[in-house]
Image (cartoon, rainbow, N blue to C red):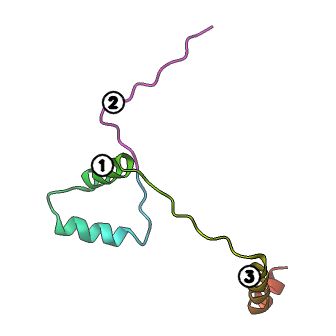
């Protein structure tokens, strides 16, 4: 039986990152204002900070069943024509 090969990655490793369309203009503007920092350095700084600092989720309240039903009825009334076209 052959031994499994271990992956050897050259360091530093290149990783592709796709920016959200609404985030891209902000990043471009920020990089223009800070010419000493390139995109790769910005991504490294942001990831390092995100990973090293604790991330907490904020609890959200759960909608009551009556509220959900009311919202569904409103959505069905509002979009009745489009739903009829789709079915």
Up-down relation of residue 25 to residue 53 (above or below): below
The residue that disc 1 covers is 44
Where residue 73 appears, as percent x and y from the top left, is 80, 86
- What is the span of residues highlighted in magenta in the rendered image? 1-16
For residue 21, side relative to residue 34 (left or right) = right
36 or 57: nearer the eye? Answer: 57
Closer to the chain start, of discs 1 and 3, is 1
Label for residue 10?
A: 2
Dots 2, 1 in contact, CB < 8 A: no
Label for residue 12?
A: none
Identify the residue at image location x=32%, y=47%. 48
84 or 46: nearer the eye? Answer: 46
Q: Main secondary structure of the magenta part?
A: loop
Pointer 3: residues within 10 angstroms few (<14), some, or many (20+)? Answer: few
Q: CA distance from mark 1 to mark 3?
A: 43 Å
Identify the residue at image location x=62%, y=71%. 61
At mark 3, the secondary structure is helix
Where residue 8 appears, as percent x and y from the top left, is 40, 25
Where residue 64 appears, as percent x and y from the top left, is 73, 76
Pointer 2: residues within 10 angstroms few (<14), some, or many (20+)? Answer: few
Closer to the chain start, of discs 2 and 1, is 2
Q: Quadrant of residue 11?
A: top left
Up-down relation of residue 48 to residue 12 (above or below): below
């Amino acid at each position: 039986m052959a031994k499994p090969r271990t992956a050897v990655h050259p360091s530093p490793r290149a990783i592709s990152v796709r920016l959200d369309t609404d985030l891209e203009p902000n990043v471009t503007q920020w990089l223009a204002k800070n010419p000493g920092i390139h995109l790769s350095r910005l991504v490294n700084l942001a990831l390092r900070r995100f990973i090293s600092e604790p991330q907490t989720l904020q609890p959200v309240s759960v909608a009551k069943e009556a509220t959900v039903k009311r919202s569904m009825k409103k959505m069905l009334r509002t979009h009745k024509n489009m739903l009829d076209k789709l079915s």
